[in-house]
């Protein structure tokens, strides 16, 4: 997102300085945004192809049962998304047996968005509460985990929607591949490691209240209180998965596995895109 904003902003400023015409500057910003969208769509297709090839390599028996977290489809990116695009490619090729969709509390992006996109594409999917993932792994029902990333540090640490790190731990214990799918622009070489990633703390009412349409509300956040008044809530937006728990990072420029600082730097150097945060 930051990359796109900066590109559009730079195009606007350059056109304004060159012509002094605000309308031309606005057109330049819009053209830059449209170009970025086209590039993002093309990158999504390449990530899907690389990711599907990786799944086939890791799971030669086929019939992939994939667990995903949060939303990584067309609603949040150009084209058909990142991790969701890989699952969709597996579905279209007849190799997706089941898409397991974490609800993604407390904002329920999985339930509201990913389940919608899966249904829209006629995928075989099942929604589960986040804390049911452990029993799903224990039952041997997960072949791979596919998630996106909000930021990838230079050492390969991955910041993603909170709940991703526990999935990585579960995947490692149960010998299940844990795969991150994200464009090269997500890699931030100026952030050396996971400890350097600032994690946003969200409002507590997202945890202590629930929202429901057409229901009288009484909570501070406009929802229905589900915890005693004054309850403090721990509500980080993201968590950070260390690189040693990541089987592979799939980008539009190729796959990094094992995930190391050197491998990521080499990938970014080969990329035609600017890799800034």
Image: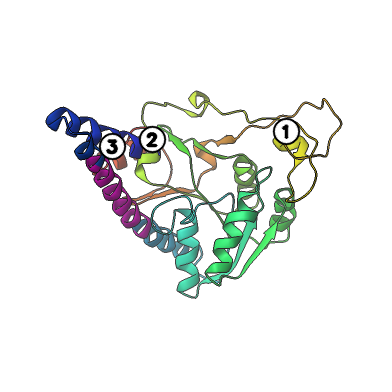
Q: Is residue 200 left or right of residue 258?
A: right
Depth check, front residue: 14 or 92:
14
* Quadrant (top left, top right, bottom left, bottom right) of the C terminus: top left
To which residue does mark 2 refer?
2
The structure residue drawn at horizontal position 31% and vertical position 42%, both measured from the top left corner, is 267
Disc 1 + disc 3, Cβ < 8 Å = no
Q: Is residue 148 above or below residue 266?
A: below
Residue 163's disc is: none
Which one is in front in this view, the residue at disc 1 or the one at disc 2?
A: 1
- The CA span between labels 1 and 3 is 35 Å
State the SS at label 2: helix
The structure residue drawn at horizontal position 71% and vertical position 34%, both measured from the top left corner, is 221
Q: Is residue 174 left or right of residue 220?
A: left
To which residue does mark 1 refer?
205
User: Per the image, is 100 magenta?
Assistant: no
Query: Where does residue 163 sit, x and y in percent of width and height?
Result: 64, 42
State the SS at label 3: helix
| Tag count | 3
Query: Where does residue 242 sit, x and y in percent of width and height?
Result: 53, 35
Disc 1 crowd, CA 10 A, few/some/many (<14, 14-19, 20+): many
Q: Is residue 64 visible?
A: no
To which residue does mark 3 refer?
7
Q: Majority secondary structure of the magenta segment?
A: helix
Query: Where does residue 184 sit, x and y in percent of width and height?
Result: 35, 43
Q: Which residues are magenta?
A: 27-45
């Amino acid at each position: 997102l930051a990359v796109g904003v900066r590109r559009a902003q730079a195009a606007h400023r350059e056109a304004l300085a060159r012509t002094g015409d605000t309308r031309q500057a606005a057109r330049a910003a819009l053209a830059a945004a449209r170009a970025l969208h086209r590039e993002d769509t093309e990158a999504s297709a390449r990530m899907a192809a690389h990711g599907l090839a990786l799944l086939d390599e890791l799971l030669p028996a086929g019939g992939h049962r994939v667990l995903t977290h949060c939303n990584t489809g067309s609603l949040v990116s150009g084209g058909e998304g990142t991790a969701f695009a890989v699952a969709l490619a597996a579905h279209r090729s007849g190799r997706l047996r089941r898409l397991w969709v974490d609800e993604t509390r407390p904002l329920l992006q999985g339930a509201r968005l990913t389940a919608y996109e899966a249904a829209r594409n006629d995928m075989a999917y099942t929604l589960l509460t986040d804390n049911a993932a452990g029993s799903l792994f224990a039952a041997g029902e997960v072949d791979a985990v596919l998630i996106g990333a909000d930021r990838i540090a230079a050492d390969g640490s991955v910041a993603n929607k909170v709940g991703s790190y526990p999935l990585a731990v579960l995947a490692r214990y149960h010998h299940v591949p844990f795969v991150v799918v994200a464009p090269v622009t997500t890699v931030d070489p100026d952030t050396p490691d996971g400890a350097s990633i600032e994690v946003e703390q969200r409002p507590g009412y997202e945890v202590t209240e629930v929202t429901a349409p057409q229901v009288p509300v009484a909570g501070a956040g406009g929802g229905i209180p589900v915890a005693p008044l004054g309850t403090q809530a721990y509500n980080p937006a993201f968590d950070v998965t260390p690189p040693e728990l990541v089987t592979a990072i799939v980008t539009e420029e190729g796959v990094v596995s094992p995930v190391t600082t050197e491998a990521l730097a080499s990938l970014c150097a080969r990329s035609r895109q600017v890799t800034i945060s």
